């Protein structure tokens, strides 16, 4: 059963899903029964990822209570400088940089998430990356 208070990352994912105009969110922690049938459900994860509209990835999260940057916790603002000639802005790194330096990329099941999902929303320290 779902507890009265879910971890911040899950609360933020629910907000993101609502903001995307969607109604459903699959959360392994709540949707995979923690029992002897767990391995049978895990064998179906390829179908879960393939049939999902998108997979939400908390790429810079330290844990379930970290939240998604830009939803409930602040994101670092993009630097900009206004001059007489115009506005200069800094660019954020390519998606590979924050992902390859994240804890997310070190976990075994994340390869399956990235490979089998139709699309992914990667929440990182600087911005959200969309990959399809």
Image (cartoon, rainbow, N blue to C red):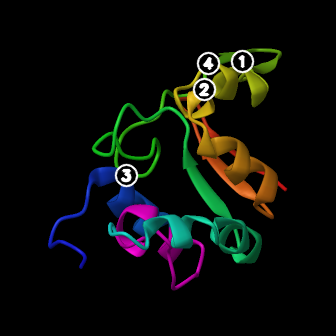
Neighbor class of circle 4 (other Cα within 10 Å; few <14, some 14-19, many 20+) is: few
Asked whether 22 falls inside the magenta stretch, the response is yes
Q: Are marks 1 and 2 in contact (CB under 8 Å)?
A: yes
- Earlier-in-chain disc, 1 versus 3: 3
Query: Could you say which is closer to the camera, residue 34 or residue 98?
Result: 34
Q: CA distance from mark 1 to mark 3?
A: 28 Å
Give me the disc on residue 90. 1
**Image coords of residue 28 (percent x, y):** 45, 64
**Image coords of residue 83 (percent x, y):** 72, 14
Q: Measuring 80% from the left and 51% from the top, which residue is drawn there?
A: 115
**Image coords of residue 72 (percent x, y):** 35, 50
Which numbered mark, 1 or 3, is in the foreground of this view? 3
Query: Could you say which is closer to the camera, residue 100 or residue 39?
Result: 39
**Element at badge 2?**
loop
Neighbor class of circle 2 (other Cα within 10 Å; few <14, some 14-19, many 20+) is: few
Q: Which residue is mark 4?
A: 101
Q: Measuring 71% from the left and 50% from the top, which residue is drawn there?
A: 112
Q: Measuring 24% from the left and 79% from the top, which residue is drawn there?
A: 1
Q: Are marks 4 and 1 in contact (CB under 8 Å)?
A: no
Q: Compared to 61, does 103 lie above or below?
A: above
- Earlier-in-chain disc, 4 versus 3: 3
**Element at badge 1?**
loop
- Earlier-in-chain disc, 2 versus 3: 3
């Amino acid at each position: 059963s779902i507890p009265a208070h879910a971890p911040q990352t899950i609360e933020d994912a629910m907000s993101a899903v609502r903001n995307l105009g969607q109604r459903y969110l699959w959360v392994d922690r709540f949707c995979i029964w923690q029992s002897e049938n767990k391995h049978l459900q895990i064998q179906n994860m390829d179908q879960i990822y393939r049939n999902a509209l998108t997979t939400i990835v908390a790429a810079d999260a330290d844990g379930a209570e970290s939240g998604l940057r830009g939803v409930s916790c602040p994101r670092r603002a993009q630097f900009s400088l206004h001059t007489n000639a115009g506005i200069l802005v800094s660019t954020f790194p390519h998606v590979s940089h924050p992902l390859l330096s994240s804890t997310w990329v070190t976990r075994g099941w994340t390869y399956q998430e990235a490979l089998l999902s139709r699309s992914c929303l990667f929440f990182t320290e600087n911005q959200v990356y969309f990959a399809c």
